[in-house]
Amino acid sequence: MENDIWIAGISRGHNSGVCLLKNGEIVFSIEEERLSRRKYDGGPYASIVKILDYTDKIDYLVIAHTQSLDSTAGKVDFSADDVYTGLCRKLGLIDQRIETSKHPQVIDLSIMHHKLHAAAAFYRSPFDQAVAVIADGAGSIIPMGDPANPNNMLGFWEYETIVDCSYPSVFKTLYKHMGSRDPVVGASGIKLTAEIFGEEGEYEAVLSDRGGITKAYEATTTFCGWAPIEAGKTMGLFPYGNANPEIPELYDQNAPAPGIFNRNVFIPNTPNGAFVNDGFYTQLQPKREEWEAVDGDLTKLQVRRDMAYAIQKQSSQEMIKLIRKAVDMTGEKNVVVSGGYGLNCVANYEYLEELKDEGINLYVEPISNDAGTAMGAALMYWHGRTEDETNRDLTTLYLGPDYKYTIDDIQTAINKIDSNITMSDATDKDVVNLMTDKNIVTIFQGRSENGPRALGNRSILFDPTFEDGKDYVNEVKKREYFRPFAGSILAEDVHDWFDLRGMDETPHMMYAVNCKPGVEEKIPSIIHIDGTCRIQTVTEEQNPLYHKLIKEFKEKTGVPIVFNTSFNLGGDPLVETIDDAIHTLVNSDIEYLYLPEHGKLIKVPNE
């Protein structure tokens, strides 16, 4: 193409990042935390600078968030640009001569948060048309009331949304559950015009002073002792709980729509997390002797475990209701799921069982967190501007920057950190021998994985046959005792080991699946206490070097699966660069780093 079109989509809030497109193709996509080394980092400045590795000009900067640039972005001194326009202008990525803050190359789609989740899922799915189901903690804020009287305006935040999607860029809102901290009277089930989304027509709206599906999950996460954004820990804790009849219904079954939480159980704090109203329910308060028995560890209090169990079970049922509602509203059987709740691997697997006889084709977006909105914004703008109807079926997640490290680059990184670190030749067989001798081996190759899952390019590997493997690796990674680990399995063997409930493969580790009878005894360190494992199927085409390594492990052990977890320590982002990888080893008890592209093994002295 003579005149290439470069589009950079950026997400601004937590899980911020950049997705760079060239003529509609993804050049790279990365979260800011991978570069800044601060978990959930906002403001993707380092990611924007990374654009310069690929182009010195972009045609459009498309911005995703939950509130507009004008209302939330900081300003550059004197010039008064918002910080993102200003940074791109100063780097020369957009026209430096334009002095207005309304730069024509900058497109702000921040008030379309749920639509951007829908766009990322739709364009990455195999479908030419679909209905998107989005469930999020809090999306965009939508003002309601009389604009002529600001005192009568209320701000409502998106919780759940249903969007009708089709090429090239049609995203029509059909339904939305929104919430406010303020009391709402007589506002359920009304029709609202969709002008705020640049559309014509109406959509079904449910307004409440309560939270939605994800808000209740966030509240329970806080109740268990973590920040609301750490809901994955609650998912790991849930099978330690039991069905407890003393815990009240967490969602209001008499509400006009799915997912509206019980206002007696939860106290909303929109747009932030909510709280469990344990002062209202004495049964949620542990007795003094229970506190003393667990020595301050909330996760060992049975009532916390039972709440984790309750929220996992009940929230997935509310999502199933929402999926059915989407299908009923549209007649569409192709369903894509995104938003923060889309990362719930346990719920994703539950949908397959519950919906198996309803003819629904389900796609769950692996970059369901807010990082995915950068990709959604870039792709939506590309398809809308060019009217390109190409379905690229963007299946790969190996989308990080391409560093193309040479042996000299790696040796320089080693020398910079510690001259006692050694690098030697190694084969897959050597690495498998280390693993079966109960060594943790990290692997670093190619482009990093986009999204929160490690898929064999930035992974920690271990032999899953060791009975104490989970406890051992959790201790080394400095993670909580109850958190499970994943497995990477040869795709050709997966159906002998796991029940995929009708799926051919699960390459993105988005489902916690049941193991077949007799499997748990063979790979005990990666089977959770409920008999499930979050697995990644690997084909030679998807990741040839990783597939080859797993095949070597199978040849020695008879087991076609390796223990896989993210290459990081507890609380740290996934490693991104070779320097990050070596630093992680130096600061842990892990000794080995395998570089299969180069046939090299790095060893850090373990003092």
Image (cartoon, grey):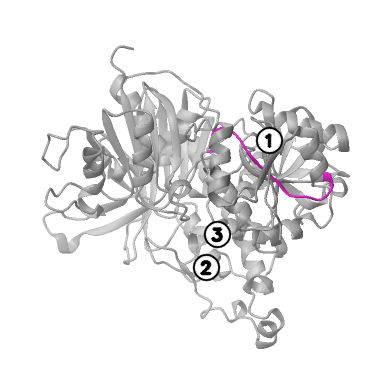
Prevailing secondary structure class for the magenta stretch in the rendered image? loop
**Closer to the camera in the image, 327 or 368:** 368
Image quarter of the C terminus: bottom right
Where in the figure is residue 548, as x and y percent of width and height? 74, 28
**Closer to the camera in the image, 394 or 338:** 394
Identify which amino acid the numbered label 1 is placed on.
Lys
Magenta span has 437?
yes
Identify which amino acid the numbered label 3 is placed on.
Gly
Disc 3 marks which residue? 571
Q: Is residue 578 left or right of residue 519?
A: left
Magenta-drawn segment: 436-449
Identify which amino acid the numbered label 2 is placed on.
Thr
Label 1 SS: strand
Give the residue drawn at x 21%, y 59%: 153
Disc 2 marks which residue? 222
Give the spatial CA distance, label 1 vs label 2: 44 Å
Give the residue drawn at x 62%, y 34%: 358
Q: Residue furthest bottom?
A: 288
Q: Residue furthest front?
A: 419
Label 1 packing within 10 angstroms: few (<14), some (14-19), many (20+): some
Where in the figure is residue 288, as x and y percent of width and height? 65, 87
Q: Earlier in the sequence, mark 3 or mark 2?
A: 2
Of the residues tagged 1 and 2, which is closer to the observer?
A: 1
- 164 shown above or below 230: above
**Closer to the camera in the image, 516 or 439:** 439
Disc 1 marks which residue? 600
Give the spatial CA distance, label 3 vs label 2: 17 Å
Where in the figure is residue 265, as x and y percent of width and height? 51, 70
Give the spatial CA distance, label 3 vs label 1: 28 Å
Res 162 quadrant in image: top left
Label 2 SS: helix
